[in-house]
Amino acid sequence: MSLAGKKILLGVTGGISAYKAVFLLRLFKKAGADVKVVMTEAATEFVTALTFESLSEHPVHVRMFEDDGKSAGAISPVEHIDLAKWPDLVVIAPATANTLANFAHGRADDLLATIVSAYEGPIVLAPAMNDVMWENPATQENMRILSDRGFRVAPPERGDLACGYEATGRMAEPETIFAAAQTLFASPLRGKKVLVSVGGTEEDIDPVRVVSNRSSGKMGFAVAEAARDAGADVTVVAARTSVAPPHGVRITRVRTGDEMASTLRREFKNADVLFMVAAVSDFKPASTLAQKKKSGEGWTLELAKTDDILAALGAEKGKRVVVGFALETEDEEQNARAKLARKHCDFVVLNKPGDAFGLDTNVVAIYDAKGRVYESKAPESKREVARRLVELVSGLPR
Ligand SMILES: Cc1cc2nc3c(=O)[nH]c(=O)nc-3n(C[C@H](O)[C@H](O)[C@H](O)COP(=O)(O)O)c2cc1C
């Protein structure tokens, strides 16, 4: 999606990576966008307003009031409101911990925060700070608040920090922030309701022991995140997971396969797309012991088959798009394609067990009814796989 002709307000705050905002501005300008820059006073300690002024071809706005106490707006006395009405998109890069806190709590004590509080369109944040500041629970809580309110985030990356060591906190590269801005306008799943099942279900052996599997929830959460970024309204039904869920999606927690099945059945009615990423236990104890099994002699646990949720929902899919996940250790392609047909899926994602569990990367092959449509050439991030899947689903005629 082109940014040509888009009006972008670039907010620059007082971090060491403020210089990178200059490169971002150039990318926006090169793409044909009209860019106005607002800097916090702290930002002007790092880069001069003149640099942004020259490159944006607009005056740079910094202060709400001039030194004589009058409003800064030479033409309009309500410049902060005019600037809030002007853009199609606001990008804050870098976004300091302080500015994130201001936004999260609705403060409006400088020009940038005032504009943001009076602005109703999409906002991309590119946080950048020392790793301890980033991990600080207050910052993390502020990020959650902002993401839940629909702010898009180009998350900080791992790399060399100005502090002289490697950690997570440096601002995403200008190209990454630019891409985040672009996809915002693409939003191929805008208006669609996407349902994602995540994590590993548990089946009780006795009051303390369970039958489960090694699913971490990373792949499912990555799919939920990619669908959210594509503009969808995302509901996640999550069994046990070992990683934090993404912001900006609705999450219902379940534990057993039966809970997963009944929750999905309810949510499926309103969904346009189902990504069945959860590892639902195929077996459960034939009966659950009322008391904890005493240690001592070994014993044999009898397992019974659980209900096949994907097959049941697939059979009632109607116009919905259904994506299944398969984990096969033999006859992989044949089994994956058989699953696709048997369970009425539009796509099946085949992954290898060694690559699937707990890692941030995955090696997949994605099949549709006609055959293999995508294959990882090497381990790729689960986010990457998720984006690919969302792209494939978005491309289906509906
Ligand atoms: C050399 C230097 C580098 C700084 N880098 C950052 C940074 O990368 N991220 C951050 O959140 N704060 C950073 N700070 C602190 C902010 O400048 C400070 O919190 C300031 O109040 C932010 O104001 P603003 O959010 O209005 O721009 C830095 C401060 C100094 C002196």
Image: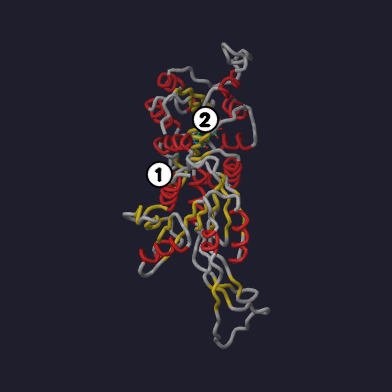
Q: Is residue 168 above or below residue 97?
A: below
Task: List x then y, in percent, for residue 77.
Answer: 62, 14
Disc with the residue nearer the chain's start (2 vs 1): 2
Distance from mark 2 CB to nearest ligand 1 atom below 8 Å: no
Three-letter code, disc 2: Val
Mark 2 residue element: strand
Three-letter code, disc 1: Asp
Q: Residue at x 50, y 61 (%)?
A: 216
Q: Nearer the viewer, residue 136 or 93?
A: 93
Q: Residue at x 59, y 47 (%)?
A: 137
Q: Residue furthest bottom?
A: 297
241 sits to left or right of 326 = right
278 sits to left or right of 369 = right
Crowd tier of the residue under label 2, counting other residues whose Cα lies within 10 Å: few below 14, some 14–19, many 20 or above: many
Q: Nearer the viewer, residue 227 or 20?
A: 227
Q: Residue furthest top?
A: 75
Task: List x then y, in percent, for residue 295.
Answer: 60, 84
Question: How was this image coloured?
Answer: secondary structure
Quarter holding residue 316:
bottom right
Quarter holding residue 150:
top right
Q: Which mark is residue 90?
A: 2
Q: Quadrant of the N terminus?
A: top left
**Number of disc labels:** 2
Task: List x then y, in percent, for residue 379.
Answer: 36, 56
Q: Which mark is residue 160?
A: 1
Q: Is residue 76 above or below residue 101?
A: above
Q: Is residue 216 above or below residue 71?
A: below
Q: Nearer the viewer, residue 254 or 308?
A: 308
